[in-house]
Image (cartoon, grey):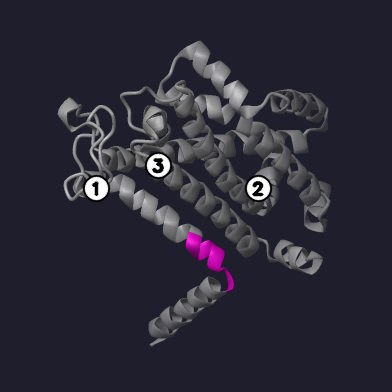
Amino acid sequence: MSTVVANSTSFRSTVSIMRRHPGLVFGLVVVAAMVLLAIAAPWLHTLDPTLIRPRMRLKPPSSEFWFGTDASGRDLWSRIAYGSRISLIVGASVASASLVIGLVIGMIAGAIRKLDGIIMRIMDGVMAIPAILLAIMVVSLFGAALQTVIIAITLPEIPRVVRLTRSVVLTVRGEAYVEAAISMGTPTQILMIRHILPNILAPVIVQATFTASAAILIEASLSFLGIGTPSEIPSWGNIMADGRNYFQMAPQLIIAPGLLVALTVLAVNILGDGLRDLLDPRLAKSVGDAR
């Protein structure tokens, strides 16, 4: 009986959260749909996305080719479906890497005052370079590959996580329970892991969602410029780059992947806003009062 009551209470709590945070639900649904598209791509009426058939070039949308074909006769729907994998892999990888690295560096900067100035000046120097230019430089030096693109996008995103982590660490260090732990002689490592880390994860996780959306957009931009993922690997940016010369004849070559990029980035950003309101109700209330 207690299990039934607990399940009912959990269900009501979930419904309540969904009603109070519709943006969070929208973001989760769209992101889940994109993940499902990437995973189930081979079974969604798709063909080999790299198969070139010159006789089928620039075919309009039909029952055989849902979104038509590109200038090389490749099925556009198949390339878009498989291309979602690249965007999601890049977004998730950049967000995870920048979260872990930025969290460690930010906690060190916030906890060790002697290193704070040095670390933050280095971060300021990296942030002074526009993200897209730094990514172009790294890709140009090490060649176009998926791993290189991930590294190139991660580098300019790390300082943002570092600055956020450092500011939150400095705020949490002033709390009474942290001061009490310090007065009891708690080692710095234990203090950071037990008392500070659990209280700074929420804003850093929210920042990771915005980092993921920025990474998806930068990857699409690099691929569109021809210096992102290799052309033989289908990605939304590559698809738009291949179709820009045929926009008047086949506008879907740019419109379809462009809409998916915009929808994915919008959904991830809205998901981040929803997580912020859910994990930090005080911030959500202060924003509402300001309005």
Task: Measure the alpha-carbon separation of dots 1 and 2.
Answer: 49 Å
Q: Which mark is residue 257?
A: 3
Q: Is residue 206 found inside the magenta-colored segment of the image?
A: no
Tell me: 216 left or right of 62: right
Q: Give the distance between the C-alpha atoms of the residues marked 3 and 2, in whole angstroms.
A: 39 Å
Q: Are marks 1 and 2 in contact (CB under 8 Å)?
A: no
Q: Which residue is mark 2?
A: 197
Q: Secondary structure at mark 2?
A: helix
Q: Residue at x 38, y 40 (%)?
A: 251
Which amino acid lies under the numbered mark 3 shown in the image of this protein? Pro
Q: Position of residue 183 (x, y in %)?
A: 84, 49
Q: Which residues are magenta?
A: 20-26
- Report whether residue 96 is seen: no
The residue that appears at 49% across and 73% down in the rendered structure is: 14
**In the foreground, 142 or 261:** 261
The residue at the far bottom in this view is 1
- Spatial CA span between label 3 and label 1: 13 Å
Residue contact between numbered discs 3 and 2, judged by CB atoms under 8 Å:
no
In the picture of the structure, the residue carrying the numbered disc 1 is 66
Left or right: residue 46 compared with residue 246 = left
23 falls in the magenta region: yes
Residue 79's mark? none
- For the C terminus, the image quarter is bottom right
Q: Quadrant of residue 120?
A: top right
Residue pushed farthest front? Answer: 248
Q: Earlier in the sequence, mark 3 or mark 1?
A: 1
Image spot of residue 158 (x, y percent): 63, 32
Q: Residues within 10 Å of mark 1 (few under 14, many from 20)?
A: some
